Image (cartoon, grey):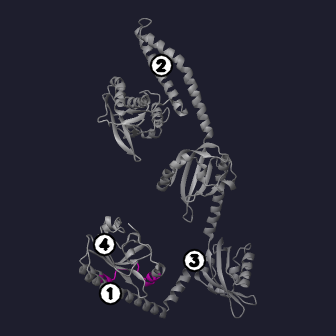
Amino acid sequence: MRAPEFPANESARQVTLDQLRILDTPPEARFDRLTRMAARLMDVPICLFSLVDRDRQWFKSCIGLGVSETPRSISFCGHAILDRLPLVVEDAHEDERFQNNPLVISDPNIRFYAGMPLNSADGQTLGTLCVMDRKPRKLNEDDLQCLRDIADCVEEQISARKLAIHHREQELQEQNESLIMLAQLVDMVPGGLYQFRRYPNGDLCFPFSSKGIERSFGVTQKQALEDASSLFKLIHPDDLPAVSAAIDESANQLSTWSISFRIMGPDGDWRWIEGHARPQELADGSTIWHGYLEDIDEKKRALVGLEESELQLRRLFELAPNGILLADYLTSEIIDVNAAMLKSTGYSKDEFLKLDYRNLLTRDHVSRRAEALEQLRKTGYFGPIEQNVINREGGIYPVILHSMLIRDSSGNKLLWVLMEDISERKKIERMKNRFVATVSHELRTPLTSITGAIGLLAGGAAGALPAKAQSMMEIAKRNAQQLATLINDLLDIEKLVAGKLDIHLEQQPLQPLLEQAVITNQPYGAQRKVTIDPAPNIPGTDVYVDHQRLLQALNNLISNAIKFSPDNGRVQLSARHELSEGNPTVVIGVKDSGQGVPAAFRDQIFQRFAQADSSDTRSKGGTGLGLAITRELITVMGGEVGFESIPGQGATFWIRLPVTNTDAQ
């Protein structure tokens, strides 16, 4: 679809249309007769007398449509007024200007259009007389002449209407209705209109004052005429010298008098008003001002309150512990910045305001720019995300970034950006991870010995144990194995975070890996009376992975699915091809038959030590690290992990991996 262009004489054309005063007027029988005639003669379901306004086409007469206007940007008539010749579109589906037009591809499904331009007496094209059909059509010369004849009749009626308006205006002027209306309007003006005259000898009077003066200040027109001082006595003593000085200057320079001052109202309270007047020097040497007074008390008090609020917000802005900046959304030019941002980046304010805020962010932010812009467009907000910031010396520190899209009073798009420096938090987190890793390493050796000794005792290596001792030994064995699993998981997650876990990526066929994962978990499934259904129709494809680490991830998902399925439940595996951002991938799904993931737990499910906080879930055991390790492992191998869950209908955890060619190395 192509929106119609504006003709070169658009301004003059629009002036003529406005002067006609025909837009948004009720239907008129003389125009409706002509459109009905055109519809019958041309044998079409739709006929319009359309006027092309600034951003719409409005139908003065309409046959066959249930609307009174459509946007100009999608109108056929917008194209028709560009030429004095008729516009004929035999099949809109074949015309690039209209192929995807909403009026073509949806109701009213226009296929054929013929529009005859309608011109004013001074030659301006105002709109069209047009006929439309829902099927392709062709017109011969007789058809076009018929349409032109009816269009000429429409133009004559337009001219007749304009002439009638002109005669009516003359009649109104002769009856002096405009003066009566003006007097009524003057009396209704808030604050009031006035004339103030100063004579050469210094005498003052108000030759005219409206009813608004009396309502606002309690001074009648007669009082103002006879004694101008009655109004001046109401002016606040602190403001009177400035008012008098402004009058002197206006008289000397014959410049507009404009000033705000306080005046006492009829209730005895001081109120802010604003006065404006234009001086005129008279033949006798006196000066007369024509002006008005406006009550601005509420506006003034609101302005004072706004200034106080802005001052408070400015203080909060400067005292905020997190870095904040305001930037132009379109140009990225920085408009303002607070002290915390300057402190963390090391720039002076003058230096910072010359930056493009995007230069503060490391290149990995560029890849998320499109996502950020789309989210800002949809919701007006983006974040929180973790991002690295470059300071003045070129150093890098981590932040949590939020951004919000706003508009200023002029409608310009601005962007608030908040950056929380998390360097100290990261430092503490690294110390904690090192501590956990150290403790885990120190615990592994003695725990291995303890686990082995308990296993030997439980297996009868020191002789048969009493039943009660044997039961306690089995409990100790399970707890020791659970502790060993926790320590191994802790070491794995620490290595993953530090980037020290050995990952050997090789091209692997997918099917054997899924089969091995099922076999590995069948004993645990049998113990829980849960059936594992292998994936049917596994795609014959290869993946580029570390097969041990992929099995570890799959085992975590399958064992979790068994754990959270009821007795005699089923765990179902699936695998399918899927395009992700245009690239071929394979998606492996593990579906359980449990109660699903609680809504309050979904945002934390892949965090370390995350477990749903319920006695039922806790009773099922686990370290709370399996899903976190799974996500890290799959991410390292170039994939991603996620889940879908409906309450009461189980959950499906999935792994998406890129597929490789058969000749991949």
**Alpha-carbon span between mark 2 and mark 3:** 87 Å
Q: Which amino acid does label 2 sit on?
A: Ala
**Alpha-carbon span between mark 3 and mark 4:** 45 Å
Mark 1 is surrounded, within 10 Å at the Cα level, by few (under 14), some (14 to 19) or many (20 or more) other residues, namely some
Residue marked by disc 4: 65
Residue marked by disc 3: 190
Which quarter of the figure is the N terminus placed in?
bottom left
Tag 2 and tag 1, C-beta contact below 8 Å: no
Q: Is mark 2 on a helix, strand or loop?
A: helix
Q: In this view, does 97 lie to the left or right of 200?
A: left
Residue at the image point whose x is 37% and y is 82% from the top: 118
x and y, in percent, of residue 205 in the image = 68, 87
Tag 3 and tag 4, C-beta contact below 8 Å: no
x and y, in percent, of residue 82 in the image = 40, 77
Query: Where residue 480 is drawn, which disc sits there?
Result: 2
Q: Is mark 3 on a helix, strand or loop?
A: loop
Residue marked by disc 1: 153
**Alpha-carbon span between mark 4 and mark 1:** 22 Å
Q: Which of 512 and 350 is in front in this view?
A: 512
